Image: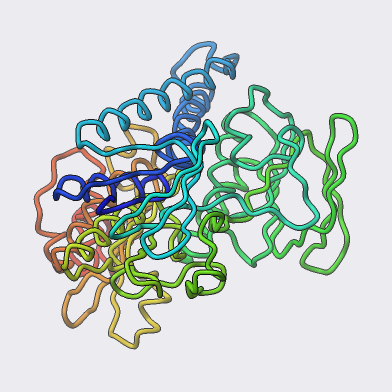
Amino acid sequence: MYDLAVIGGGPGGYVAAICGARTGLKTLLIEKDALGGTCLNRGCVPTKCFVYDTKLLHSARNSSVLKGAGSLSMDIAKMAARKRGVVKTMVSGLGSIMKSHGIEVIQGAGELTGPGKVKVTRADSKVEEVQAGNVILATGSKPALLPFIQADGRLVQTTDEALDSEEIPKRIVIIGGGVIGVEMATIYLNLGCEVAILELLPEILMTEDEEVRRAMKTLLEKRGTGLHLKAKAREVKTTGKQVSIVFENAAGEINQLKADRLLVAAGRSPVLEGIRPDRLGIRMNGPFVQVNGRLETSVKGVYAIGDLVGGMMLAHKASAEAEAAVANILGGRKEVDPTRIPRCIWGVAEIGAVGLSEAEARKTGRPIRVGKFPYSYSGAAQAMNGSEGFVKVIGDSDTGEILGVHIMGEHATDMIGESVMAMTMESAVEDLAEAVKPHPTLSENIMEAARDWSGLAIHAPKKR
């Protein structure tokens, strides 16, 4: 008998297990693959390895001070090997952490059979049923495929296969202009590939601020990306070493693209295998498991977190929900505020954002003021040859409450943390403006944008 059983060992599941164990709960973690889930093994971390390596190549090739840099090329096999090494190290580290907390880890598939009852099919096919006072479902998500597309892992891939490939395609088509599509497009652009993106919606990155979306679109097109918006894929054919994608464009015309590879990045769907919501009476919210404010499902003692419950499909959101779920199991009352969850995109320019977009803020009916500061005014950005981008601060003009911060440019994903902290502590825009920043650093850009909100920016022309 366990106090807590967790199904799924990704950023939600393993954090839940650690939080439970360190409070004295006898904890079981069930993971059918490797610890770390999609994020560590096939998603966030492997992608960042590739983004870093290919950005290095692109920067060197386009350097104005390096001799012969234009002839540099990528050893894709070594790049893939480095990624595997990073993943192996991190997975091993997680195993050590589990052991240090006394968490029992079973490699196998977990199936919820009733309140507090989990059927476990181990990797060696042995089956057993375990009981637990509480169960946390953290099964994550998987790549969503269009009905007429069959991924073969070679010509037609999802991100699960793309990050293991050791061949660089000359031409690639990506279905999906969301976060995954833009990040993968960036990797292939950095490698020198011809890239086309098919996006069903009117714009790419529809969850981001309009100004950010427009700027990213401009940068992608500047790099030669073929952007097909309001485009609906109709048919996919593979012949020999090529794949053909038939799609309907914004005008309703039928067009065709040919490529060496098709990457399907049309979103992700929750993993429901092993949960049996229909049999157990677990209420659903569309394709996702429905939870209350305590992250408990309609079945008492069964909680759900992460991609399984919808919302932003982010590793750190799953981890935050894991901590909250365990706190609630222990009798607390902890909720996760989605407006305090940062969003990061590693595109041709990085994006870091938290809170409301300008359009969302204006829809609240509150008096809104916006402060902005372009990277081109920053000495640090100029020094690192990264002058494209901006910081945008949105605040209530009466109270100074920070409603949203959007950063696009070098190290935006690292910089957004300061704004998350400020919003979490309920600081005002003026607090961001008054904090003294080291010079020359990109952190000054946040300070300057906050000062601009009050019309007091230093390193920007006077507003008229």
Taking 138 as reference, is 250 left or right? Answer: right
Q: For the point 68% across and 50% down, which residue is it?
A: 197
Taking 195 as reference, is 109 left or right? Answer: left
Dividing the image into 4 quarters, which one contains the C terminus? bottom left
Residue 166 placement (x, y as % from top left): 64, 22
Q: For the point 46% across and 59% down, which residue is it?
A: 212
Residue 309 position by quadrant? bottom left
Instruction: Identify which residue, 74 or 108, lies in the foreground.
Output: 108
Picture mark count: 0
- 109 to 426, vertically: above or below: above
Instruction: Identify which residue, 371 or 48, lies in the foreground.
Output: 48
Residue farthest to the top, as pictured:
68
Residue 322 placement (x, y as % from top left): 30, 55
Taking 150 as reference, is 304 left or right? Answer: left
Q: For the point 26% across and 43% down, which residue is it?
A: 442
- 26 to 427, vertically: above or below: above
Residue 372 visible to an observer of this rendering: no
